[in-house]
Amino acid sequence: MLYANCLILDSALTVKRRFQLPIDDGFTNQGLFVGSRGEVYLIHTDAEDAVAVIQYQPESGESKLLEIGPSGSRRTRFMPFFGADHKMYLATVVENAAGELAGLMIATLIFSQPKVENVQFYPVSADLRQRLGKRVSSGHYDIRAFTVQPEGNRIVTLEKHNIVANTYQYNPLDVNSPANWKPRKQQVQIGERITFRLTSEGKVLSEEITENYKTYP
């Protein structure tokens, strides 16, 4: 079994609680996040890109599970937003089979009931796809920022990251094979940012590209 060893610290960096959380067999962990009331969330995906979100209460040891069904596209790079309405909003980058940006998925989860309230898919527009097509295609988009405004609109900022090495071709799915777990010398290239402004009904209000090229050894 694979476990994540977790520590909860206060503002003085004093350890207040230690616990372990299991990463279930057949799932890839997409991150652990602390909610606004001290609860811990684990985000898992399986081979068909179904999403499992687990809420764990460190004080009581209780847990709840909410699931989002499989997808024909690849869901990757997750970021939650915890609203004042006690809802969890989960943003996900969606890629097609070629690894290209296809859009965004935003799910609304209510663990107090518990239920998945809705799942919205926002496809990349033809105009944005045309503008991105004129750029270097290598790299993948990570979520840089995600917020839900009081009126319900969502703002998501993506940033392109590309890992470059002379001795191998980077593939993010290589993490699924332990034989590939070894250090390699590489560079990280930072590309453009895309900021999406979206409605809760699934409409894209705007798509803005900002230049942001950098290289880190």
Image (cartoon, rainbow, N blue to C red):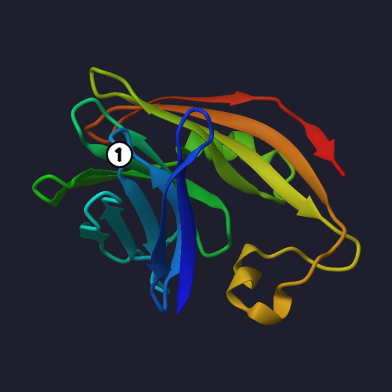
Please tell me which residue lies in front, 158 or 7: 7
Q: Is residue 16 above or below residue 172?
A: above
Please tell me which residue lies in front, 64 or 38: 38
Please tell me which residue lies in front, 123 or 59: 59
| Rendered location of residue 172, percent (x, y) | 63, 63
Q: Is residue 71 above or below residue 156?
A: below
Which residue appears at 24% of the width and 61% of the height? 67
Which residue appears at 83% of the width and 68% of the height? 168
As helix, strand or loop, the secondary structure at mark 1 comes to strand
| Rendered location of residue 112, percent (x, y) | 12, 44
Q: Quadrant of the C terminus?
A: top right
Which residue appears at 72% of the width and 76% of the height? 180
Which residue appears at 33% of the width and 61% of the height? 51
Q: Is residue 40 above or below residue 21?
A: above
Residue 39 appears anywhere in the view: yes
Q: Is residue 72 left or right of residue 63?
A: right
Q: Amino acid at mark 1?
A: Tyr
Residue holding disc 1? 89
Q: Is residue 54 left or right of residue 114?
A: right
| Rendered location of residue 14, percent (x, y) | 51, 37
Q: Quadrant of the N terminus?
A: bottom left
| Other-residue count near label 1 (Cα within 10 Å), few / some / many at <14 / 14–19 / ≥20 | many
Counting every numbered tag in the picture gives 1
Q: Quadrant of residue 173?
A: bottom right
